[in-house]
Image (cartoon, rainbow, N blue to C red):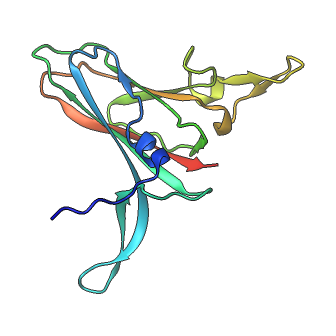
Amino acid sequence: MQTRRKIPIWTILLLVLPAVAWAQNHIQLRSVAEVQKEVVNQEGKKEIKRLPAEKVLPGGEVIFTIFYENIGKEIVEKAVITNPVPEHMVYAENSAQGAGTQVAFSVDNGQSYDIPARLFVFDATGRKFPARVQDYTHIRWTFDKPLPSGAKGDVSFRAILK
């Protein structure tokens, strides 16, 4: 018999982040939201495990992993994965990872991307300030090399619930 667990609606939203890949016809994406917890294993030793992000309190960190696979028959040139930083969360500095990719960020809802040192925001008077992680709205991973058919892997980042 299968039992159902109630999952808060915001958790479901976190699990289905709208990651987008350039060449969508060829790249399949799957997003997962997890938290790290200390658990006691069968030998009675403490270890850190990743578990589904079913309940996250303010200040809690969530690990977002986007799994990708080139399901097409062709090589995908210049592949890009773009993911928004979830609403009510702040990107955790230096947490974006992805082997063989260049990571860039947006502070203008995905209109433009750059490395953190070249990102700026403006206050109400028009003064320019260096962007902070709280200003990041999107993350983009650009692959260094073409993705051959069947290539798969993952990219990830961490964010903290406000």
Query: Which image quarter: residue 129?
Result: top right
* Position above or below: 53 against 129: below
Identify which residue is drawn at 90% across, 19% down: 125
Q: What is the residue that sits farthest to the right in this orientation?
A: 125
Query: Which image quarter: residue 37?
Result: bottom left
- How far across and how far down the image is residue 31, in percent? 34, 38
Give left or right: position of 149 versus 97: left
Give left or right: position of 22 versus 93: left
Identify which residue is drawn at 41% across, 40% down: 97
- How far across and how far down the image is residue 136, in percent? 61, 31
- How far across and how far down the image is residue 50, in percent? 35, 60
Q: Quadrant of the N terminus?
A: bottom left
* Position above or below: 43 against 80: below
Identify which residue is drawn at 34% across, 60% down: 5
Q: What is the residue that sits farthest to the bottom in this orientation?
A: 44
Identify which residue is drawn at 32% across, 31% down: 100
* Position above or below: 3 against 160: below
Q: What is the residue that sits farthest to the left in this orientation?
A: 73
How many discs appear?
0
- How far across and how far down the image is residue 117, in percent? 64, 28
Please tell me which residue lies in front, 97 or 27.
Answer: 27
Please tell me which residue lies in front, 116 or 127.
Answer: 127
